[in-house]
Image (cartoon, rainbow, N blue to C red):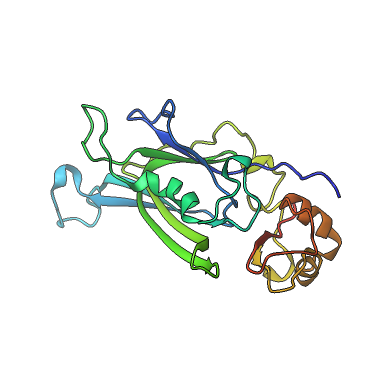
Amino acid sequence: MPNPIAFAKAHLVELDVSLKPQAGGQDVTVQFNPETLKVSFTNQVGAPGGRRDESSASTAQVASTGTAKLSVQLWFDVTAPLPVAKAGTTDVRRLTQEVIFFVTPRERGPNDPPTAPPAVRFVWGSFQFDGLMDSVEETLEFFSDDGRPLRASVSLGISQTQTQKVSFGAGGGLPGGLPGGVPGLGGGSLPGGTPPIVSAPQGGTVQSLAAAAGAGSDWQRIAAANGIENPRLLAPGQLIDLRIR
């Protein structure tokens, strides 16, 4: 079995009021890198000084405010391999609560709003986005026989109250240091538009899932990248990342 291939993981980092990493603050590494990132920009356009003058079609307009928002979906699954510090976790909410932390109001410093949530930085390779997490939607997807949630998708939104200059972070190049293509997909998606993360059916194997995605010859690399010791023994519903890194 080949050694697991190291690849960059996205992080959520707690920031202080000056948008610098908070000393001793929360730093969450995602379990599965997102498939896509969506960034939207909005300007509120008006006349200079707030006046409205319709006497001329060429009246000057200015952007009074600018905002940007990052939307991303993350997956968490306690049936998949977990870091040593989280080994033995049996309820997926123990993982997702680390993300919900960033939208939870709490007491801050004397010069800050008393119930403001912390600022947060989403960083993945050279992609960096700072702001406030204004929305989190958690969907529990898969349950154990005794009713414990084992898998969840978390859709989150991070907003900048004023559009900031694009930062390319410290990673250089494309996110994860990849040579090209879509971030995290190793230069391209799987054949036929197959989703990169799939749920293992009853009796499923890494070989069969890879073959169905048109990547049958790469099943060993896929197993290694997912930390799977026995590719012929998958738990029903286990998430498998089929992206070839």
- Spot occupied by residue 159 in the image (x, y as percentages of width and height): 36, 47
Q: Quadrant of residue 108?
A: top left
Which residue appears at 75% of the width and 68% of the height?
209
Most foreground residue, 164 or 127: 127
Vertical placement of residue 169 versus 236, above or below: above
Residue 179, quarter of the rendered image: top right
Question: In the rendered picture of this protein, how many numbered marks are placed on residues?
Answer: 0
Residue drawn 31% across the image and 43% down it: 161
- Left or right, 164 with reference to 218: left
Q: Check the image and report above or below for 118 versus 244.
A: above
Residue 16 versus residue 225 in the image, above or below: above
The furthest residue to the bottom: 202
x and y, in percent, of residue 220 in the image: 83, 56
Residue 210 image-quadrant placement: bottom right
Instruction: Name the foreground residue: 241 vs 47.
Output: 241
Pick whichever, 48 or 200, lies toward us.
200
Task: Point out residue 101 in the picture as x, y percentages from the top left corner.
Answer: 38, 45
Q: Look at 68% across and 73% down and name the residue there.
A: 201
Give the residue at x 63% y 41%. 84
Residue 25 visible to an observer of this rendering: yes
Q: Position of residue 23 (x, y in %)?
A: 43, 25
**Residue 174 in sight:** no
